[in-house]
Each structure stands twice: as C-alpha cells, then as structure tokens.
C-alpha cells in the first residue's frame, strides 16, 4: 500500500507545480477580483485610445478623445478617428476578447493548460472554408465583404462538430478530444495548403489572412462581427460554472449533477463559435487563445468565474497592444498582427515551459 | 460462519431503521466497460443509516458497482433505483441532491482554493446561473466545519497534504447535503494516521449526522473496524454480506482473496483482525517459525484482552 504522506500523484494536474509557485502572486484572486476587473477596464480604455491614435498620421490621445467626444481639433480628425480607426480598434477589442475566452473555455474543458482554439478544429476549419471560397475566383478577393466571414464561420463550426463526433465513443474524454482536434486540424491545414498551391495567384492576400491581420478592417467587417460577439461572449461567460464543474473530472462532475457529455459539447460549441467568428474577421491569429488564459490564471487563480472575464480582458488588451506594435515596429510598413503576436507569443511560451519545470 | 449469496438486507439498528425515505438499490445490474462485463446480474440494496463497506480483490467489481450506484456508469442490463425510480431516468441534479460521490482519484486545478472547491458542491441546488445564497454559504461552512477544513479554506489545493486534501474533497461531497455518501477508496495514498483520521471522520458523519455511507475499501481490517455491513465481491458476484464479525472469516479469505490468514480479536477492543501469512495455492508450506510467530501474537493478544477485561 502506498503510504506517501503529502503527494498524491494521480490527483496532480498538469498545472500542479505552477500552482505551488504561483501562490505568492495571484494579485486579483478572491475578494480583490473586482479591483482586477476595474484595472483591466482602465488598461483597455487606455489601449483603445492609444490604438486609435496610432496610424500613418499620428494623433495625440487628447486629439483622439476630443474627436470621439464630437469636438475634433481639426475636422479631418473626425474622419480619421470615426471612419478609419475606430472600426479597427473595436474589431481588435472584440476579436481579442473572443480568442481569449475561447482559449479559456477550451483549457477548462480539456483540463489541459496547453489547449487553444486551434485544437477544436475551429481555426483550421474556418481557414480552409475561406480559402476554398476565395480560390473560386480572383474577383472574390477584391471584396471579401460580408460573405467571407459567414463562409469561414460555417467552416469553423463544422470542423468542430466533426472533431467532437470523431472523439465521441460512449463518452468524450478530454485526452481523446485534444488528439482528435489536432489530427483534424492537421488534415484541414494540408487541405488549405493544396488549395493555395492550386491558386498561387491569390497566395499573397490569402497568406496575410492566414497569419491574421487587422489591416483594412472597416465598419463592414464590424457589422458582420458584432452579432456573433453579442451572442457568443455572454454565452461563454455564463458557462463558467459548468467549466468549473468539468474541471473536477468526469466522475465528480457527474456526481455533482452535471450531464457531462452535453455540457462538454455545449462548451466546445461556444468556444468554436467564438474562435470561428473571430477567425472569420481577422484570420487565424495564433497564440492569443493560449496566452491570455495563462496570464489570467496567474492573476486570478483557477476559478472559471474569474478566469473567463479576465481572459476576455487580456485577450483584448494583448491584441490591441500587438496591433499597435504591428503598426509601429517597421513604419511605414504595417505588419500583420498575427505575426507580431506569434513572435512575442513563442518566447513567452518557452518562458512558461522553463518556468514549469524547475 | 454465516454467508449468503443473496443481497438480503442486514437488519439495521432499530433507531436507524425507520428513518430515511431515501432508498438506493441495484436490481439485476450488468455492468462493464465496452464489451467486457465486470458484473453480471447483481442485486444489492444499500442499508440506510449504516456504513457499508464493499471489499474484494482487484477487479472484483466493487468500484464498478459504486460507480453504477453513483450514476457514473450506466448498467448495460438492469437498473439502479433511487427512491423507486430508475436513476438514469432522474434529472441529474435531483440525483446529486440525494447522493454524493467521492471518486477514487479526483482531479482539480491545483490553483483552486479549498473554499472554491467546496463551493462547487452547491451546483445541484443552484444550477449554472443562480448565484449562491445564504443557505448555500451556510452549507459550505457546515461542510468545512464537519471535516475540520475551515482552517485551510483559503489555501490552494497544491499546498495541501494528502490528508488535508482528502478532507477538502469530503467537504465538497458534504456541501451537496445528501443523505447518501459514496466513497471510492477514500484512504488510498494516505499514511496510516491519516487513513484512520479519514475513517473516523466517516464514522462521525454516520453516527452524528446520520449519513448513509457506502465505501470501497481495500484494507479488510479497516472495513471490519468501521463498517456496519461488509459486502464481499468476487468476480462480479456478492459472495458474502453481513456484519464484519460474520463475514470476515478464514475460509472467506482463502476463497475470495486466495490467502491463508488468521482472524483474531483485536487485543484492545475485540474487533476481528485479519492477519494473512501466505497464499493458499503456494506450493510450499509456510516457514514453521512464521506460524510460531502468529501463534504467539495470538496468545499475546488474548492475554492483553484478558488483562484489560480483568482490570
């Protein structure tokens, strides 16, 4: 009989060691969470103003606020702020939030801190559907408009459904879900590559979209995005209690009165909806869904009721910050924000790995 | 030696017999994983108000039976009944208000605090959206107090010792405020002190708070000491069922576990104590000195009991 005093190896979760070392710094756990929300909101507001101020013509934060308030310093400030930059800022804010929340949901239901939206097939499904559609004719690239996002969304949700069905045998285990998601994504990505090879004339524009970019995002895109965000973000935030129960393992969750297969399918669907509708507008931005929930857990602990909102804030903040960097780093060239995030995200990820194995 | 292959109810102590309306039983259930059946046509009724220990060798189906009672595993044949209704047909949260389960190796994010963990026990009452009310917080506080976990409520699971961790998990089950508590090997991974600690807590929950408890135990001596009823399984069948004094016999140990053992009264309080010393189908006789040792241990035990009785 095992008589180890303080270690129960089987109950240790992947994030086990981290938990030990993080105890000192959970600045916004427990009662301090509202403070964290407040600070997060302030940071977001500041980032939004800075984001609007950034561009080929520099504005000062004061000029931005004046233009937003309807008292522009110069008449053309109104055009710059309202017509050119505000939609881009709003899209960054909301898609960032959606990526962050999708990642947080997936990490909770898969009980794996390395899960990210890509693992539902949502990202690669959306990308393949979009690329297939774009490849049908050069005219479609000229005006992506409103159809492309819907096509991408359908592709993303369909791919997630496929992942869930394939992983389902009597019950859907988190481990099987992750593996199936990775495999389906790999197949879909190879499909994308084949389409790209067949339509090399469109390669450049599609590639930018694959990496993920906010360049040229205007009100048309926002109009397609906001209805999905309005549905999926509240749904995701409201599912935090389910996620909390699912984090306790299938047996405990069943014992607590949760219908585990339904709850997991519902959460997976919400995450796929979030990821696919965000991908549909800004492309396959990697790492955001992985990093935002990680930082969120460092700040607020493991309770999904706090991790979810904090992931929303951090996802939005990171995307805004990265997009500011994308516009400033190689001026006057504007980089695709997906590339900037990946360039910053990969080192961060390495840091996490090093830090988790002392 | 009294043994019955039936699942006949052991008479419960009078004051507890009439108490609960809740009843949990398995009727002719066949259970398994995929194609492999572990249990065939087994019937078993939980005695309300008592502590029932399920014992048996590895793979005998005791954990499987517990999972079926907890609605975690659906029977391929037969059904588990809670208050006369098939448990798979009942709303999930309604079941979770009447029975709680502590699985064998529960998992949770290590950054979760004990308080946050125990709070999840209110889900059967609140559902996914309703915020916790005064009554919920009172139930959480009671659960923490009953398990002696109030002191480490703000601590993270990662910082707990094995014993504290198990208390936190039991508190989670208690926060569900169920008349029935199912525990799958609650003493695994604990040292002897913490094993007894957890078992004493379970007895306390039964004696003081009237919980009906069904638990899977590997240690027969623990089962004999803490259970009112001991149900022995072998190869998916109940082979012995009754009070520990009747169930725990040398013949049973040979037949079910394949070990040769002596059953002695515990020197302190006379509870049956099993001391295995060899495997039944071992080709060789046990070394003679081993036998001597056991005999002398038995003699010592009898002497001790005699002395205590005399003094």
Image (tube, rainbow, N blue to C red):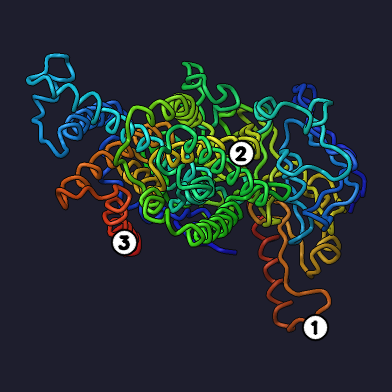
| Neighbourhood count class around disc 2 (C-alpha, 10 Å): few under 14, some 14–19, many 20 upward | some
Would residue A212 appear left or right of B57 to someone viewing this image?
A: left
Q: Is residue A194 visible?
A: yes
| Neighbourhood count class around disc 3 (C-alpha, 10 Å): few under 14, some 14–19, many 20 upward | few
Q: Earlier in the sequence, mark 3 or mark 2?
A: 2
Which element carries disc 1, helix, strand or loop? loop
Q: CA distance from mark 2 to mark 1?
A: 59 Å
> Disc 2 or disc 1, which is closer to the eye?
2
Q: Residue furthest top?
A: A70
Which element carries disc 3, helix, strand or loop? helix
**Disc number for residue B285:** 1
Q: Quadrant of residue B304?
A: bottom right
Would residue A69 appear left or right of B209 to someone viewing this image?
A: left
Q: Are marks 2 and 1 in contact (CB under 8 Å)?
A: no
Reading the image, the residue beneath label 2 is A265
Instruction: Work out whether A104 lies above or below B178.
Output: below
Q: Let me know if marks 1 and 3 both belong to one chain.
A: no
Q: Are marks 1 and 3 in contact (CB under 8 Å)?
A: no
Instruction: Work out whether B140 lies above or below B32.
Output: above
* Circle 2 chain: A
Q: Are marks 3 and 2 in contact (CB under 8 Å)?
A: no
Q: Let me know if marks 3 and 2 both belong to one chain.
A: yes
**Percent position (x, y) of residue A174?**
58, 50
Q: CA distance from mark 1 to mark 3?
A: 61 Å
Would residue B305 appear left or right of B139 to someone viewing this image?
A: right
Reading the image, the residue beneath label 3 is A350
* Circle 3 chain: A
Q: Is residue B311 visible?
A: no
Q: Quadrant of residue A234?
A: top left
* Circle 1 chain: B
């Amino acid at each position: 009989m095992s008589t180890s005093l303080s270690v129960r190896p089987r109950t240790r979760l992947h994030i086990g060691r981290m938990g030990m070392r993080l105890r000192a710094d959970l600045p916004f756990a427990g009662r301090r969470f509202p403070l964290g929300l407040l600070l997060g909101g302030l940071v977001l507001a500041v980032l939004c103003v800075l984001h609007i101020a950034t561009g080929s013509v520099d504005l000062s934060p004061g000029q931005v606020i004046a233009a937003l308030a309807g008292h522009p310093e110069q008449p053309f400030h109104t055009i710059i702020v309202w017509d050119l930059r505000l939609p881009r800022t709003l899209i960054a804010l909301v898609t960032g939030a959606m990526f962050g929340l999708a990642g947080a949901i997936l990490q909770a239901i898969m009980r794996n801190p390395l899960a990210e939206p890509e693992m539902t097939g949502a990202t690669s499904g959306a990308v393949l559907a979009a690329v297939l559609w774009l490849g049908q004719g050069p005219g479609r690239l000229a005006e992506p408009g409103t159809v492309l996002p819907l096509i991408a969304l359908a592709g993303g949700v369909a791919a997630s459904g496929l992942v869930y069905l394939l992983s389902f045998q009597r019950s859907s285990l988190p481990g099987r879900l992750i593996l199936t998601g990775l495999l389906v994504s790999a197949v879909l990505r190879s499909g994308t590559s084949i389409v790209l090879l067949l339509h090399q004339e469109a390669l450049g524009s599609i590639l930018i979209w694959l990496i993920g970019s906010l360049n040229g995002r205007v009100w048309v895109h926002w109009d397609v995005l906001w209805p999905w965000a309005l549905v999926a973000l509240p749904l995701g935030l409201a599912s935090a209690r389910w996620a909390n129960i699912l984090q306790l393992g299938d047996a405990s969750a069943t014992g607590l009165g949760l219908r585990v297969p339904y709850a997991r399918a519902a959460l997976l669907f919400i995450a796929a909806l979030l990821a696919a509708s965000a991908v549909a507008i800004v492309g396959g931005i990697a790492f955001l869904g992985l990093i935002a929930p990680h930082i969120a857990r460092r700040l607020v602990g493991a309770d999904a009721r706090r991790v979810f909102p904090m992931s929303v804030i951090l996802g939005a903040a990171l995307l805004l910050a990265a997009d500011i960097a994308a516009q400033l780093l190689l001026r006057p060239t504007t980089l695709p924000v997906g590339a900037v995030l990946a360039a910053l995200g990969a080192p961060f990820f390495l840091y996490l790995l090093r830090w988790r194995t002392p | 030696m009294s043994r019955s292959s039936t699942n006949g109810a052991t008479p419960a102590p009078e004051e507890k017999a009439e108490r609960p309306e809740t009843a949990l039983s398995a009727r002719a259930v066949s259970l398994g994983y995929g194609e492999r059946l572990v249990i065939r046509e087994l019937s078993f009724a939980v005695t309300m108000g008592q502590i029932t220990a399920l014992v048996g060798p590895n793979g005998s189906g005791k954990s499987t039976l517990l999972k079926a009672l907890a609605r975690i595993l659906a029977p391929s044949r037969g059904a588990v009944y809670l208050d006369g209704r098939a448990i798979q047909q009942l709303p999930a949260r309604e079941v979770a208000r009447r029975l709680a389960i502590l699985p064998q190796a529960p998992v949770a994010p290590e950054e979760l605090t004990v308080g946050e963990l125990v709070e999840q026990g209110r889900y059967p009452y609140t559902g996914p959206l309703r915020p916790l009310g005064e009554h919920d917080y009172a139930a959480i506080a009671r659960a923490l107090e009953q398990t002696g976990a109030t002191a480490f409520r703000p601590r993270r699971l990662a910082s707990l010792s094995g014993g504290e961790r198990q208390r936190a998990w039991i508190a989670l089950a208690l926060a569900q405020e169920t008349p029935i508590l199912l525990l799958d090997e609650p003493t695994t991974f604990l040292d002897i002190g913490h094993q007894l600690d957890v078992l004493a807590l379970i007895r306390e929950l039964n004696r003081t708070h009237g919980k009906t408890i069904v638990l899977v135990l590997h240690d027969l001596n623990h089962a004999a000491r803490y259970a009112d009823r001991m149900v022995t399984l072998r190869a998916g069948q109940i082979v012995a069922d009754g009070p520990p004094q009747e169930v725990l016999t040398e013949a049973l140990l040979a037949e079910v576990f394949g070990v040769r053992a002596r059953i002695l009264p515990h020197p302190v309080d006379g509870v049956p104590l099993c001391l295995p010393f060899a495997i039944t189908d071992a080709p060789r006789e046990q070394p003679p000195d081993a036998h001597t040792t056991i005999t002398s241990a038995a003699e010592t035990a009898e002497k001790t009991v005699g002395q205590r009785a005399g003094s």
